Amino acid sequence: DAGITQSPRYKITETGRQVTLMCHQTWSHSYMFWYRQDLGHGLRLIYYSAAADITDKGEVPDGYVVSRSKTENFPLTLESATRSQTSVYFCASSDAVAKNIQYFGAGTRLSVL
Amino acid sequence: QKEVEQDPGPLSVPEGAIVSLNCTYSNSAFQYFMWYRQYSRKGPELLMYTYSSGNKEDGRFTAQVDKSSKYISLFIRDSQPSDSATYLCATEGGTSYGKLTFGQGTILTVHP
């Protein structure tokens, strides 16, 4: 499928478990981003990546880990999930010239019980 | 204070109405202004993109930016039920990596 895809779309897990959310894009975009969306907060940046093997923290990185070994993939890992990480997670990508024009995936709805 | 403030609504209008959605922002470094539309259970999709002050029109949609008052608007003419969605304003400027700062989003319902 062309575009940006996230998996799984829905995930229920328990406190303390490790969870990995996947993101894959087919545009060969340099930049990829992870956001979380919560009521009252809008979308907040967790981590971003400018290229393979280059990642950096966003606004709310605590409790999350990212990696980017290939340009097209940008997984987000919650090493020990907490209830406060219950949220909707969106992955986005953009090219290096127009970094602020970002294309979003459909999201992963995560519930931590 | 949040860098971008947006009234979450909800806003309910009849079909055919003119809709006005607004945001204010505090950071003078913001240069780029965007409106995203987000349908229920979907990801945000870019609707309008403007640089600096001025107006931009695309079909029934007009984006307006007033940098002197730090005010961003989106107008929807002849609103349709298919326009029912959450509208998110976003700004960017002053970073090397395209960091977007979003408003909370306004929930809009257009009823037939």
Image (cartoon, grey):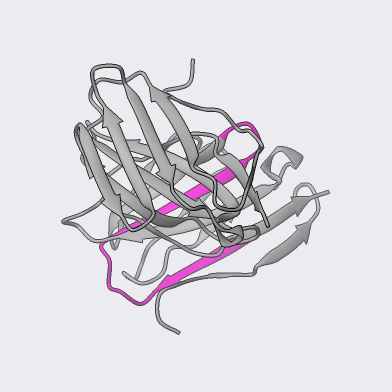
Q: Quadrant of the N terminus of chain A?
A: bottom left
Q: A61 or A104, which lies in front?
A: A104
Q: Residue at x 48, y 53 (%)?
A: B78
Write the start and end of the magenta stretch as one range. Answer: A18-41
Is residue B42 on the magenta stretch? no
Q: Is residue A25 above or below residue A105?
A: below
Residue B94 position in % (x across, y down): 22, 31
Q: Is residue B87 left or right of residue B97?
A: right
Q: How many marks?
A: 0
* Residue B67: quarter of image: top left
Instruction: Give percent across and percent down for residue B58.
Output: 30, 55
The answer to whether one can see residue A35 in this image is: yes
Relative depth, front residue between B75 and A105? B75
User: Measuring 47% from the left and 36% from the top, which residue is drawn there?
Assistant: B20
Residue A28 located within the stretch drawn in magenta: yes
In the depicted view, which residue is nearer to us: B18 or B32? Answer: B18
Q: Residue at x 33, y 53 (%)?
A: A49
The reply, left or right, for residue B78 in relation to residue A111 is left
Q: Which residue occupies the extreme left position in the image?
A: A97
Q: Residue most toward the right?
A: A113
Above or below residue A1? Residue B104 is: above
**Quadrant location of residue B52?**
top left
Q: Position of residue B79 (x, y in %)?
A: 52, 53
Which residue is depicted at the point 30% across and 36% down?
B64
